[in-house]
Structure formats: structure tokens, C-alpha cells
Image (cartoon, rainbow, N blue to C red):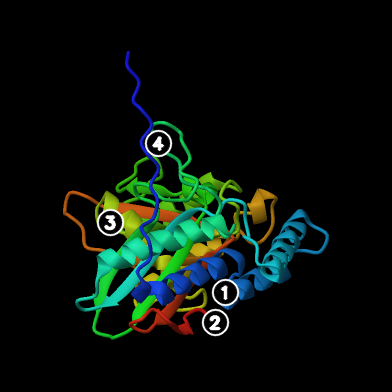
């Protein structure tokens, strides 16, 4: 049987002189995202540590996590050896050249990998060959939107493989869990996802939950929810109440940090609802590990940073 030859590795295109500033901005965004957790996440970690009982494995795990965060920031090195999936969420002015942005973004990812801000983390699913520069089909992933602003809004989330592995999707009704097509059913399946994960997702985690949509839109939108601030309140009062209830009940399961037991199993729960087909009722749960690497910038038309979003 003939074997398929290895596909040539993808190399980034040269960065046009007109986009040098954008290239520099994207490299810096990747560096900061990979090495320095934003203040709202740090605050959540500190609060979680304070809730753990003195001398317990849960307290020890949270102290190790907090120490890891401080060291990584101090030496500008990745928070975790698994720098994860590279997810860009980009809002552009109307008429902006998204093709060139994608090319510059790929060049920035390759450079950030060369500098050690990203692990060589993109593998050909057929051959097992590592691209060496994090470029290839689906890597990086860029979600584009247009908005009525002259500025670029570029947000980045780095989602590790461990937490990606414990994401889940349910189709309601679920007779195994006694979960019907209502918010109570949603609560049951989300708590089941947390219970099934145990400590395997590098908890305490953050949940992005989408009610409805189809199998694809539910999962993709659930990751977009990680762009919300940790302390924000859902604009839908019904979902705000559900977020708080799930967080409280998840933290009463006793799973704790890294599955060692304790009071903090999740740091946050973010929920959204999408319209669905009458025949389908999906609940998609994305799980983000404690290394909640999320940052963003607003940049001018040349790509120069005007402000950091999560400060």
C-alpha cells in the first residue's frame, strides 16, 4: 500500500512594510497573553485561595498555581508548557483587508513560536508531523467580525489541550441524567460535565456554556464567552441566576483544585443562549483551565496599540 508523502510545512509570507506595526502588536499580544494573566483572573485565583482550608491539598494546589502565575509573569515565560489552541477574535472596520491581517497574524504566530512565547504545538492529524511554527490547517483560528469603528479590536485566547479534552456537548432530553429541555435540564448536564471532568481539566476551571445553536455554533460561541470579564453579570436575569447557581453547586461537589479536593472547582460560569431548530436542543460546554490566558488590544488603522482591553 502506498503511503502519503508528508505535506510541505507552511511558512509565513513576508510582512508588508505597511503592516510592520500590526505584526509587532500581534507578537506582543501573544507574549502578554501567554505569560501574564489579566487582573480579573488573578483576583479570582486569589479569592479561591482564601476559600481553601489551611493545610489542605486544595490550599497547597492554589498556592502552587498562584506562585506559577507570579513566576511566569516575572520572567516573561509561558504560564504552562501547553500554550494551547491559538484563538483570535477580531473586530475590524468595514472594508478592512482581512486576508492581509490573516497573513500578518500567521507571521506573528511563527515569530512568537520562535521566541518561545508559544510551544511548537500544531501537529498534522494524519502524519503526526509537527509544523514547528504553529501554522497549518486550522492553526491559528481567527474569528472575524466587522464593526462600525475605525479601530481594530483583537482578542486572543490560548486554550490548552487538557481543558479542551473535558469539554462536553449534550442533546436534551437526556434520560440518563433526567434532564429535560429547560433550564433545569441545562443545570443538570453542566454539573455532569464538571463532575466528569474531575481534576483532569487543570481545575479550577471556567465554563463557557451555550444553550441551543447547532453542534458547531454551540461550541464555537461557547469559547467566545471566555472574552467576558470574570466578575461581570449576565444581562439576561434568568441566565445570571443560573450562572450563580451552577457555580455554587459545582464548588460544593468537593472536587477542588486539580481534583485534590476543596472548595474551588470552578472560578466562573458564563452562559449564553442561541436560537435552535425545534428538533434539536444542544448544550455545549467549553472548559478553560486555571491558566485562563485571555487578553486583547484596541489598535489604530496602522496596527499600533491604543489600549489594552483587560487591565
Kindly report the distance in space between the C-alpha atoms of the residues bearing marks 3 and 4. 23 Å
Cβ atoms at labels 1 and 2 below 8 Å apart:
yes
Mark with earlier residue (4, 1): 1
Dividing the picture into quadrants, the one containing residue 32 is bottom right
Within 10 angstroms of label 3, few (less than 14), some, or many (20 or more) residues?
few
Among numbered discs 1 and 2, the one appearing first in the sequence: 1
Q: Secondary structure at mark 1?
A: loop
- The circle on residue 38 is 1
* Mark closer to the observer (4, 2): 4
In the rendering, which numbered label is found on residue 125?
A: 4
**How far apart in space, not on screen, are marks 2 and 3 (Cα)?**
29 Å
Residue lying furthest top: 1
Q: State whether residue 144 is above or below residue 85.
A: below
- When the figure is inspected, residue 299 is found, relative to residue 199, above or below; the finding is below
**Pick the front one: 168 or 309:** 309
Q: CA distance from mark 4 to mark 2?
A: 37 Å
- Between disc 3 and disc 4, the foreground one is 4
- The residue that disc 3 covers is 217
Amino acid at each position: 500500500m502506498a503511503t502519503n508523502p508528508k505535506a510541505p510545512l507552511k511558512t509565513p509570507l513576508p510582512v508588508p512594510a505597511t503592516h510592520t506595526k500590526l505584526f509587532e502588536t500581534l507578537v506582543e499580544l501573544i507574549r502578554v497573553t501567554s505569560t501574564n494573566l489579566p487582573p480579573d483572573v488573578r483576583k479570582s485565583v486569589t479569592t479561591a485561595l482564601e476559600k481553601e482550608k489551611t493545610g489542605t491539598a486544595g490550599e497547597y494546589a492554589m498556592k502552587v498555581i498562584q506562585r506559577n502565575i507570579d513566576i511566569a509573569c516575572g520572567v516573561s515565560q509561558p504560564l504552562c508548557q501547553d500554550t494551547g489552541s491559538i484563538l483570535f477574535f477580531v473586530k475590524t472596520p468595514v472594508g478592512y483587508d482581512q486576508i492581509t491581517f490573516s497573513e500578518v497574524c500567521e507571521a506573528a504566530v511563527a515569530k512568537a513560536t520562535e521566541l518561545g512565547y508559544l510551544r511548537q504545538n500544531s501537529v498534522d492529524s494524519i502524519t503526526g508531523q509537527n509544523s514547528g511554527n504553529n501554522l497549518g490547517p486550522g492553526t491559528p483560528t481567527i474569528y472575524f467580525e466587522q464593526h462600525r469603528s475605525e479601530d481594530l479590536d483583537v482578542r486572543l485566547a490560548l486554550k490548552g489541550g487538557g481543558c479542551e479534552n473535558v469539554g462536553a456537548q449534550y442533546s436534551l432530553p437526556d434520560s440518563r441524567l433526567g434532564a429535560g429541555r429547560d433550564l433545569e435540564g441545562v443545570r443538570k448536564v453542566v454539573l455532569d460535565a464538571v463532575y466528569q471532568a474531575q481534576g483532569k481539566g487543570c481545575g479550577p476551571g471556567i465554563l463557557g456554556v451555550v444553550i441551543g445553536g447547532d453542534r458547531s455554533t454551540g461550541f464555537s460561541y461557547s469559547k467566545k464567552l471566555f472574552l467576558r470579564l470574570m466578575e461581570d453579570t449576565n444581562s439576561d436575569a434568568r441566565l445570571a441566576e443560573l450562572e450563580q447557581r451552577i457555580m455554587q453547586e459545582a464548588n460544593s461537589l468537593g472536587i477542588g483544585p486539580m481534583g485534590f479536593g476543596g472548595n474551588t472547582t470552578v472560578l466562573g460560569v458564563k452562559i449564553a443562549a442561541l436560537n435552535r431548530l425545534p428538533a434539536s436542543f444542544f448544550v455545549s460546554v467549553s472548559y478553560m483551565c486555571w491558566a485562563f490566558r485571555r487578553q486583547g488590544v484596541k489598535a489604530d488603522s496602522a496596527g499600533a496599540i491604543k489600549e489594552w482591553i483587560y487591565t
